[in-house]
Amino acid sequence: MIPSTRKRSRHVALVSCGRIMEPKILIVDDDPNLLAALRRRLGRKYHVTTVISAEEGLSEIEDQGPYAVVLSDQRMPGLDGVSFLRRLRFQVPDTIRILLTGNVDPATETRAHEEAEVFRFLNKPCTFEDIVAVIDLALGRAAPTQAA
């Protein structure tokens, strides 16, 4: 067998019958209404899975991962978003990590960049278009000027 010279993509995609499908996106937030809305809207473009806590997110990644992008809320009961994304950084380093928060203070921002290597912050409230733009940018699908 001749070794492949193709570079391995940084992004994880689903493969079915030899056809590449949309990347897997995991969304972690403790607000079930927000999760339902995101699943409904983003599910048109991506393969979206939602979970209600960081602990469920870790289990989901263990059972169904890897995911191309993980979008996590910062403030959740139990494990907070930065702590969750920091764990992912070591478990699945190729997964792109995005933090969704209603409050970005300088200490949280520094911690998120240094500990979790977060790709981007999204401030609540944000539009679905903003979320799609950042996910597309993370996946290399959009020019930086198109993202919020």
Image (cartoon, rainbow, N blue to C red):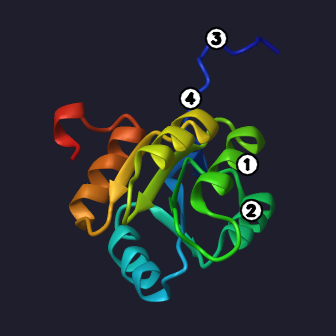
Task: Verify CB contact (< 8 Å) between mark 1 and mark 3.
Answer: no
| First-in-chain label (2 vs 3) | 3
Q: Is residue 17 left or right of residue 2?
A: left
Q: Estimate the x, y position of residue 35 in percent, counting from the top left.
A: 46, 79
Residue 106 marker = none
Residue depicted at x 58% and y 73%: 76
Horizontal relation, residue 27 to residue 93: left or right: left
Q: Where in the figure is residue 98, as x and y percent of width and height?
A: 47, 50
Disc 1: which residue: 87
Please determine whether, in this image, residue 47 is positioned above or below residue 36.
above
Numbered mark located on residue 5 in the image: 3
Q: Which residue is disc 2 drawn over?
A: 58
User: Mark 3 belongs to which amino acid?
Assistant: Thr
Write down the residue under mark 4.
Answer: 9
Q: Residues within 10 Å of mark 3 (few under 14, many from 20)?
A: few
Q: Residues within 10 Å of mark 2 (few under 14, many from 20)?
A: some
Q: CA distance from mark 4 to mark 3?
A: 12 Å
Sooner in the amino-acid sequence: mark 1 or mark 3: 3
Q: Quadrant of the N terminus?
A: top right
